[in-house]
Image (tube, rainbow, N blue to C red):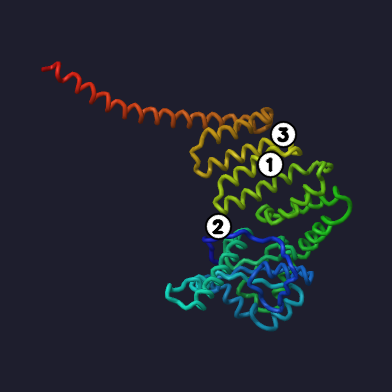
Amino acid sequence: MKKIGFFAAAILTAFVFTSCGTKKVDATKWLTSLTDGKIAAQQADKKIILFFSADDSDNLSETLKENLLNKDEFIAAETAKYVLVNLDFSESLYEATQVDENASSADKKAAEAAQKQLEENMNVATYYTVQMSPTFYLLSKEGYVITPLTFDDETTSIEQFDAEIASHSEEITAFEDALAKTTEGSNVDKVEAIDALYAMTDRRFAYLLTPLAKQVLKLDSKNESGLVGKFVFEIAQAEATDAALHNDVEKMVKSFETAAEHKHLDADQKQLMYYYAGYYLANTGSTDYARVRDYIQKSYDTNPESDIASEIQNLIRIIDERINDVSEMNENVQIEGNTDVTVDSAATQTEPAKE
């Protein structure tokens, strides 16, 4: 396994969760775009096998492809059941993005296409929290993670590949049942089903369920389920994640501040929203301590009897100490600057008297 350390800092464009239009995708082969993969999966009502590889650097990816994954019989057998998507991060892909300024227009166009592909791959890898290659996931047709899959250099047959997927049959069935219920029954039933799906999904992949969280706000505008506040929180976290990955600090902080004012948040949820606004602002390295303190103070004032109120008070004291330290430091700097001027002035005035 090879660790892929460049993903987290490589977000350049927003990742598209939903497909659109009537584009036809040839899914009788490994696809190189998850966007295309989801279009094909929804058209054919199939699950997706998503494979992140680094052929020329992790060894195992290349071995798996040579021994099984790129063989015609494997592709024919598996594309009959799944949509196959392979996002590769080999050095050759990086090299393809580099061209000399004197290169032909055709070469420059090819480099631009390679750059676009690389950016999309990096976006997907980040949102799917990929840290190592090879990494395999079984996805729903919407792109939600059903379960990770594990293959090694001893996986050399279609039967072995299928056996790994079959070993997760209970997880797959449970996920599919839960997902199906999100479109069944009353609006409250659907909201409760979405809540159940969130509960069974690894928190690493909760972000991917954001479209369902947004549905909750439409399905239950009066909060009959009592769950709307929870999903306001989930949406705020997702929006903050997007903003952070695009280095938009203000948007990240505002996602929590805006959420804090939602009418269906309870006191605990509102408190956390203000807390996160201040916490994440502080963790960006901001020196606007007054603004950080304002958010944390609002957090405390919202629910001073909560289980975490005393911890928030302690944090306020720490912020106040920091503000005082900065204030004193600035005063000392100013005094030192003024003292130099005053001493020089006094010396000028007293020198004649000595004579």
Q: Nearer the viewer, residue 37 or 25?
A: 25
| Of marks 3 and 1, the one in the foreground | 1
The residue indicated by pointer 3 is 267
Residue 139 is drawn in which quadrant?
A: bottom right
| Of marks 2 and 1, the one in the foreground | 1
Going by the numbered disc 2, the residue's amino acid type is: Ala
Residue 83 is drawn in which quadrant?
A: bottom right
Residue drawn at 55 percent across, 69 percent down:
89
For residue 168, say whether it is visible.
Answer: yes
- Earlier sequence position, callout 3 versus callout 1: 1
Instruction: Look at the picture and state if 195 lies above or below 274.
Output: below
The residue indicated by pointer 1 is 259
* Image location (x, y in percent) of residue 156: 65, 78
* Image location (x, y in percent) of residue 44: 78, 72
Q: Nearer the viewer, residue 280 or 198?
A: 280
Helix, strand or loop for disc 1:
helix
- Earlier sequence position, callout 2 versus callout 1: 2
Helix, strand or loop for disc 3:
helix
Q: Nearer the viewer, residue 37 or 67?
A: 37
Residue drawn at 71 percent across, 66 percent down:
138
- Count of numbered circles in the view: 3
Q: How busy is the neighbourhood of tag 1: few (under 14 within 10 Å), some, or many (20 plus)?
A: many
- Earlier sequence position, callout 2 versus callout 3: 2
Residue drawn at 54 percent across, 68 percent down:
115
Which dot marks residue 8? 2
> Do the CB atoms of the residues marked 2 and 1 lie less than 8 Å apart?
no
Judged left or right of residue 43, residue 319 is left
Residue drawn at 72 percent across, 81 percent down:
76
